[in-house]
Amino acid sequence: MSFIDKWLKHLEEGAATILIALLTLTIAAQIFFRYFLNSPLSWSEELSQFLLICLCFVAATAVLKRGEHYSIDTFISMLPVEVRRFAEAAALLVELLLLVALAYYSFRIGALYVGTYSLILKIPEEVKAYLMSYCFFSMALHVVVRISKTFKPGA
């Protein structure tokens, strides 16, 4: 499981880097064409929106893997060590259940969007929902690994 977790981390961070580069190039091209050539691109806003949606979910997955999402652990940090481990595991279990539910429902939403396309680029609309479903599932895998690490001796 740890191997898959590390492999997913590298995949997600690489994808986020590529998405940032593509988003930057798309916006830079739009600025250049609009203000220097006085001929705006018709597709750049739609592509930028799509790339930003993808970036948000892929980056959220990578950030969750690193454990860098905001959290308030004041109460948990005051608990004794053994109780703290179970409280952290309980919080992670709630997080896992939420992520699995989000993965399931975003997959169902994707099925509703089958056959619909964006106006200019004709990107299938279900791609966004299926990407969300993948990201929620990937986050759930990262949480499973964190739960298993919570119960390892010396954790």
Image (cartoon, rainbow, N blue to C red):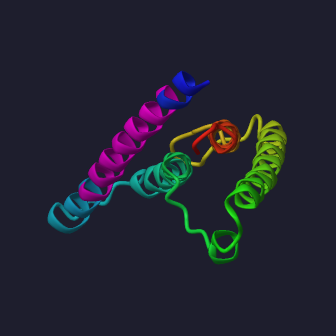
Image-based side of 13 in relation to 73, left or right: left
Q: Which percent across, then down, holds residue 141?
A: 67, 36
Task: Give the residue displayed 34% in from the left and 43% down from the top.
Answer: 17
Residue in view at x 42 percent, y 37 percent: 15
Q: Which residues are magenta?
A: 7-28
Which percent across, then down, holds residue 146? 63, 43
Q: Is 140 or 112 nearer to us in this picture?
A: 140
Quadrant of res 151? top right
Out of 63 and 114, give the one closest to the viewer.
Answer: 63
| Depicted 4 relative to depicted 72: above or below | above
Q: Is residue 92 or residue 129 the one in the foreground?
A: 92
Considering every residue shown, the one lying at the far left of the view is 36
User: Which quarter of the figure is the C terminus placed in?
Assistant: top right
Main SS of the magenta segment?
Answer: helix
* Residue at the image position 22 percent from the left and 65 percent from the top: 38
Residue 44 x, y percent position in the rendering: 39, 53
Residue 19 colored in magenta in the image: yes
Q: Is residue 63 left or right of residue 76?
A: left
Give the image quarter of residue 22. top left
Location of the N terminus by quadrant is top right
Q: Residue at position x 57%, y 42% from top?
A: 154
7 displayed left or right of 96? left
**Residue 120 placement (x, y as % from top left):** 52, 47
- In the image, 124: left or right of 59? right
Tell me if residue 126 is in the magenta stretch: no
How many marks on residues?
Answer: 0
